[in-house]
Amino acid sequence: MELTKDKSRHHHGNLHAALVEAGIDILRSSGLDALSLRKCAALAGVSHAAPAHHFGNLEGLKWAIAEEAFARFSEFMRTHAAAADDTAHGRLLGICRGYLAFARAEPALYEMIFCLQRKDPESKRDASTSYSILRDTCAPFVPPGTDPVIIETQVWSLVHGFALLELHGRLGDTPPPDDAILALLRHIGQEPA
Amino acid sequence: MELTKDKSRHHHGNLHAALVEAGIDILRSSGLDALSLRKCAALAGVSHAAPAHHFGNLEGLKWAIAEEAFARFSEFMRTHAAAADDTAHGRLLGICRGYLAFARAEPALYEMIFCLQRKDPESKRDASTSYSILRDTCAPFVPPGTDPVIIETQVWSLVHGFALLELHGRLGDTPPPDDAILALLRHIGQEPA
DNA sequence: GGTGTCAAGTTTACACTGTAAAGATTCGAT
DNA sequence: ATCGAATCTTTACAGTGTAAACTTGACACC
């Protein structure tokens, strides 16, 4: 993917993708606070007001980046889940470990995907970035008569919370190992003892 | 607490607290993106460069606000935990419900407390805002020979993740009820069945 | 082939932000 | 009473988002 446009041509051709790519580069190298419309424009070799034409405003660009980041997250999870375990618990632990691995490998993208807030309330896009891999992996643990969303949300909350506490430095210098936290999932879907 | 200073006097007297108070007001009414040094200064009736003298830069002000927010959170949790249940599980559920209640009542303050990132790495303050209420409440569930931090982190991760997923709108229009998610804690500290 | 239309970028402009530097004011210890 | 230091103001500057008017080029249509 070429980021900088051909200066001789007035039309870029694929500015939308180039700006998102530039944004991801900035996010990775300098973090969320460094992300700006003007820097993305400069990185794409385009005037500073060009991004507004494509995304409306900064929030629009951020959501476009989040969309692309979610696509990469999904692809990461798909390949990670390919290492299939034969037990349902093994698969569940596998995707949770993958989830944590992505959060650590791409912390800025992870926050864009799961923490970005919408200020435009009239935007019709649904913010619930549900991913079917989690649903499928949780399915074997849903007791009859209970809402599958409950089981999924329990798993998601535990892993998401652990990821963010660690990313935000709230767990001190030596956080507990992943499997110690994920051990709680051995009781997922069970009735109380 | 008077926010605006007496115009006749050059010294404010308690500008530090007044600026933090102004910041909390802005956070509550307009959210994190609206928080700025200049707005806090204006709300405190002081020149726009005054905050830098107290907090160094914007990040310093944010951490000062986070500190005050954490004090209020602690006070909230202390009074909330006062409604003591006689069982250890009842107490655990109680503080988790209180935690979620605070997150919903003060979402901006909650994010300041638990999500603010440090860019100044040389700052000596520890970001691990551990609160002893959680530790005490989790103590009865720590099996002999295991690190208490593991149990605390399991509880904290579940509740923190759930709170943030809901705050960030990732759980759709009808999130599962709190107790359905907290039901996972009935197995906290147990050996696998 | 000329023409109209429209999307894609550019230019210009403005208000707002953080932050640095230097000056003014006041407090407090001596 | 005086001097130093802390506190706040003033001034200045670079960077930011965003709106408006303008320019360029692509493309269908006759």
Image (cartoon, coloured by chain):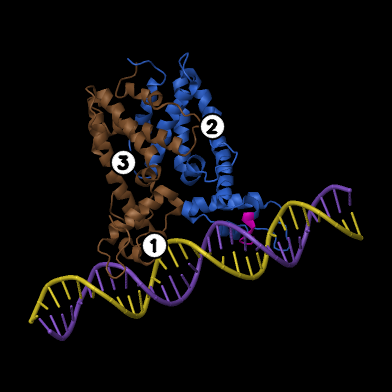
Chain colours: A brown, B blue, C purple, D yellow
Q: Nearer the viewer, residue A145 or A104?
A: A104
Vertical arrangement, residue A67 with respect to residue B85, above or below: below
Instruction: Tell whether A61 sits left or right of B132.
Output: left
Residue furthest toward the top?
B144
Compute the Cα span from label 1 to label 3. 42 Å
Mark 2 lies on residue: B130
Q: Nearer the viewer, residue B99 or A114?
A: A114
Compute the Cα span from label 1 to label 2. 42 Å
Q: Nearer the viewer, residue A115 or A79?
A: A79
Of circles 1 and 3, which is in front?
A: 1
Mark 3 lies on residue: B174
Of the numbered discs in the image, which one, if any, rests on residue B52?
none
The amino acid marked with disc number 1 is: Ala
Which mark sits nearer the N-terminus, 2 or 3?
2
Mark 3 Cα shell of 10 Å, populated few (<14), some (14-19), many (≥20): few
CB under 8 Å between discs 1 and 3: no
Query: Is residue B47 rendered magenta in the image?
Result: yes
Q: Report the chain holding disc 2.
A: B
Vertical arrangement, residue C18 with respect to residue A149, above or below: below
The spot of residue A144 in percent (x, y) is 22, 25
Which segment is the magenta one?
Answer: B46-52
